[in-house]
Amino acid sequence: AAPEEAPFVNTTPAGQKKDMSQPMLKAYNPPAVEAAWYEWWQAEGFFQPEMDSDKPPFVIVIPPPNVTGSLHLGHALTNSIQDTIVRWRRMSGYNCLWVPGTDHAGIATQSVVEKKLARAEGLSRRDLGREKFLEKVWEWKAQYGGKICEQLKRLRSPLDWSRG
């Protein structure tokens, strides 16, 4: 049997252009191929529009992700389509801006927290009272609030995170 290749180790410092000095692997290895590029693109401002540009503007505002948990197939589909459009427009000479949203779904978040409370503790929001229930909602947001944005970054979505 052929000897196994050593596992990929990313030696590129965060935000720096990818270190390409390592030997190329024999087979496609997504972590090795994708390592460091997105962070470098962000550090270089590639996803930010040029403020004094003569190029025609093109802007998409991402529908704000909810604090209700993780990306689902609907998010993935919508974001893939928007990603394709933004990249195509950028390659077509437009000054592009894809703006990330932030949570807008207070009612949906309330519903998720209420269901969790009922399942886990057998309580309703009325049992807790307003202040204690709001504490539970803020705990939920602290745990899940940035999860969808982090997942979008893992998908390498070219959003201008400086505006999010």
Image (cartoon, rainbow, N blue to C red):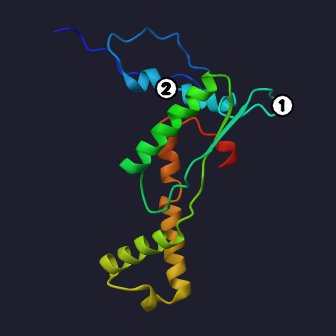
Residue 138 vs residue 80, the one in the foreground: 80
Q: Which residue is mark 1?
A: 52
Judge from the rendering whether residue 156 lies leftward or rightward of residue 90; answer left or right: left
Q: Nearer the viewer, mark 1 or mark 2?
A: 1
- When asked about the image quadrant of residue 42, the answer is top right
Q: Which element type, helix, strand or loop, lies under badge 2?
A: loop
Q: Identify which amino acid the numbered label 1 is placed on.
A: Asp
Q: Residues within 10 Å of mark 2 (few under 14, many from 20)?
A: some
Identity of the residue drawn at 69% across and 31% down: 45
The residue identified by callout 2 is: 35
Where residue 80 appears, x then y in whole percent? 46, 38
Can residue 14 be seen by looking at this rendering? no
Residue 93 position, x and y percent, is 67, 23
Residue 71 can be seen, yes or no:
yes
The residue furthest right is 52
The type of residue carrying mark 2 is Ala
Residue 151 x %, y % = 47, 45
Q: Between disc 1 and disc 2, whose residue precedes?
A: 2
Q: Residues within 10 Å of mark 1 (few under 14, many from 20)?
A: few
